[in-house]
Amino acid sequence: MNTAECLVASLEAEGVERVFGLPGEETEDMLFALRDSDVEYVPVRHEQGAAFMANVHGRLTGDAGVCLSTLGPGATNLLTGVADAFLDRAPLVAITGQTDREALHRESHQTLDIVSMFDAVTKWNAQVGDPETVHESARKAFKVAEYEKPGPTHIELPEDVAGVETSVRPLPQRERVRRPNPDRESARELASMVASAERPLVIAGNGAVRTDASDALCSFVEATNAPVASTFMGKGALPDDDERSLFTLDSGTHGEAKQAISRADLVVTVGFDIAEHDPAAWNLEDTRLVHVDSIPAEVYEQYDPDLEVVADVGATLRAVNEEIRDGDSDGGTGAVTDDDWYADLREHIVSDALAPPDEESFSVRGALPTLRDVLADEDVLVSDVGSHKMAIARHYPAYAPNTCVISNGLASMGIAVPGALGADLAVDANVVAATGDGGFLMNAAELETASRLDCSFTVLVFRDDDYGLISEQQVENRGTHFGTGIGNPDFVAFAESFGVDAVRPESWEELEDALEDAVASDSLTLVEVPLGE
């Protein structure tokens, strides 16, 4: 094999099913190696879309998604999606081409220092400069990308290395690195703190979903009666139909989840990253704080835990549950607390989230109950970034982990359509991409990719001819907005030009019918919702 063929054989050994990317002159050996492999190569319309597809695939499956680009502009286009995976903790392996190494010491056409450029947004990244190390580079890229906390890695393959024969063969895929169980003393201390608290509360972060800790969290909540407020990326860790769910940290018209935090006398964060939600907004004051995660807490004045349990998140919760059960069996008081202190807040959140629209014109908020009704518990909603994301995070109930995909680390616009494509290929469930008009047009060309692959997800486009979230913030700060207005094409005609079914409902009844038909169908469908009309 040559080096490119060994790299592709390594992808096969890792169980990779497809690679998303754009072709380039410098990746020719890689492309023809993919042609002759069992790995499907998916040509996309923009490298950012390729990275978002790999990103969401990794987030939903736990297996690193793979994206490919050439050098120069291909790599810079890829960068945003890789950076998004970095702050969203999604396992991803990016592969880029490069010019011959002999040209790297001087200015050269399309040549940038890609390894240095990717260094700030990857867990590990390197150039394959020696054909005899390609198997190690590939194995390390997947190993590092997939262990906690997961994230992107990057391999650069220069053109003059790709075609060189190599004697090495792919290293076998191994069982993932095991996360440590908590020490008994820490589990006992946490159980004791919970048992002594009158108003304990849990904040569930991305890690509670990512590490499959949902069942353990549900058992913990059952044992303690503690309410749970999730971050945007922790939605579904505790099903929102559980009476102890307070939805997200920004839930409710009056910030009820934050009110609950201010009432609590103990806050336990589970799999939380401060990049998800600034702790300074919680107003913790002197409330005791416990950090449960696979790595220590970031050093931050507003997030200074009294106790840190650094171990596997699910194993920690199971150990604490066992300690609580042992306390009950020994005649202790147990850890079950009264729910009177947060039940009123839960009631407000639920009534606000599930209320039907009370206006004739379309709104994102009014559309969410209908969307929730037409989707099954296991169906996946992929949200783009904008004002609609805030409404989805606050008001869309999630009933299972990984069923509401929100980017809130880097929070990059343009993720919804390529992300939904990645989701549609990764899960056996219905998928909906919810996006504003601004984010939609950033990667709308991936409709062609989705159509070519015979995908069957639904794209829900909220059109307001504006970068609405920025307008809202400007109006709040200055009483007016500037620089946010945009124009749009006829989205129905635009989608139909790609061979995509499309509809523009004119009433709430028509919207409900359109969503029911689109989600139930085996077709790729776009539903345009003109806001305020």
Image (tube, rainbow, N blue to C red):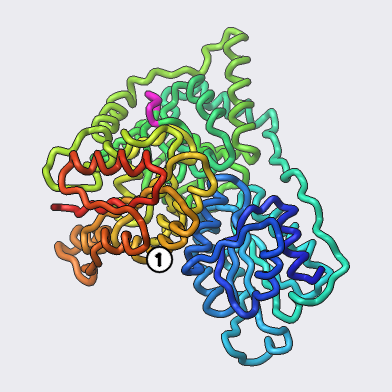
Along the line of sight, the residue nearer the viewer: 381 or 480: 381
Q: Position of residue 43 (x, y in %)?
A: 54, 66
Magenta span main SS: loop
How many marks the image carries: the answer is: 1
Q: For the N terminus, which image quadrant?
A: bottom right
Magenta span: 240-244
Along the line of sight, the residue nearer the viewer: 493 or 296: 493
Q: Is residue 244 visible?
A: yes
Q: Quadrant of residue 103?
A: bottom right
Q: Residue furthest top?
A: 331
Q: Is residue 266 visible?
A: no
Q: Residues within 10 Å of mark 1 (few under 14, many from 20)?
A: some
Along the line of sight, the residue nearer the viewer: 194 or 211: 211
Q: Position of residue 130 (x, y in %)?
A: 80, 74
Depicted 158 relative to depicted 367: above or below = below
Identified at 21% across, 59% down, the residue is 464
Q: What residue is pinned by disc 1?
A: 445
Q: Amino acid at mark 1?
A: Ala
Is residue 74 found left or right of 11 in the rendered image? left
Depicted 259 relative to depicted 7: above or below = above
Is residue 411 found left or right of 98 in the rendered image? left
Identified at 47% across, 53% down, the residue is 454
